[in-house]
Image (spheres, coloured by chain):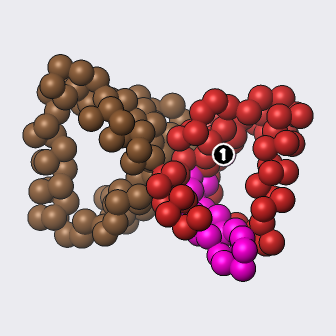
Chain colours: A brown, B red
Amino acid sequence: MNVPIPPPHEGLDAIRETLSGYYAGAGEFDIVVHHQAESASGVVMNERLDRILANGRWIELPVMGVFELSDGKVVKWRDYFDVGQLSAQM
Amino acid sequence: MNVPIPPPHEGLDAIRETLSGYYAGAGEFDIVVHHQAESASGVVMNERLDRILANGRWIELPVMGVFELSDGKVVKWRDYFDVGQLSAQM
């Protein structure tokens, strides 16, 4: 889920469609993880710079994400970022 | 630092002035921490809902924060949120 852009995408098909859409518009995708941590209850959080090459130009978005896991698989993923910071580069 | 609103506030005086400004406009301040984790290198991250009572109305902002510590004190604090989500409530 993009927290500033609800609603969440739920189910494998919806998630595949959403992520495919991101990748389709990107020549390259680069993720720089600054910090990552796991809570006592197994929730993973990270602070990242997501870099997307679109139309020959790198778009850079500072992001924090939280990942809830079950049986070793991500079951919830929420990203926090500023929509304005993204749209200003598009 | 509010990541979507640079520049960072640096130094005790600048930080005190900035935080005082937030509190001055708030009747109440409520922070709901959903998840919190510490990395192997001692960086703390959390996912929160910051609630601010302003002019008799609660403003609710989903936030993720990262805190770098040294000698038990916070030396860097970065919050990630969507400016639009905040301004839409003001």
Q: Position of residue B39 (x, y in %)?
A: 61, 41
In the foreground, A45 or A4: A4
Above or below: residue B63 compared with residue B54: above
Q: Position of residue A57 (x, y in %)?
A: 24, 21
Q: Note whether residue A36 is visible.
A: no
Q: Quadrant of residue B22?
A: bottom right
Determine if the magenta segment contains residue B53: yes
Residue shown at the point (88%, 34%) measured from the top left: B12
Q: Quadrant of residue B30?
A: bottom right
Q: Note whether residue B6 is visible.
A: yes
Q: Which residues are magenta?
A: B42-64
Q: Position of residue A52 (x, y in %)?
A: 26, 30
- Name which residue type carries label 1: Val
Q: Position of residue A70 (x, y in %)?
A: 37, 65
In this figure, which residue is indicated by the disc labeled 1? B44
The total of numbered circles placed on residues is 1
In the foreground, B76 or B61: B61
In the rendered image, the quadrant that contains the N terminus of chain A is bottom left
Q: Main structural element of the magenta stretch: helix, strand or loop?
A: strand
Query: Which residue is farthest top?
Result: A56
In the rendered image, the quadrant that contains the C terminus of chain A is top left
Above or below: residue B71 compared with residue A9: above
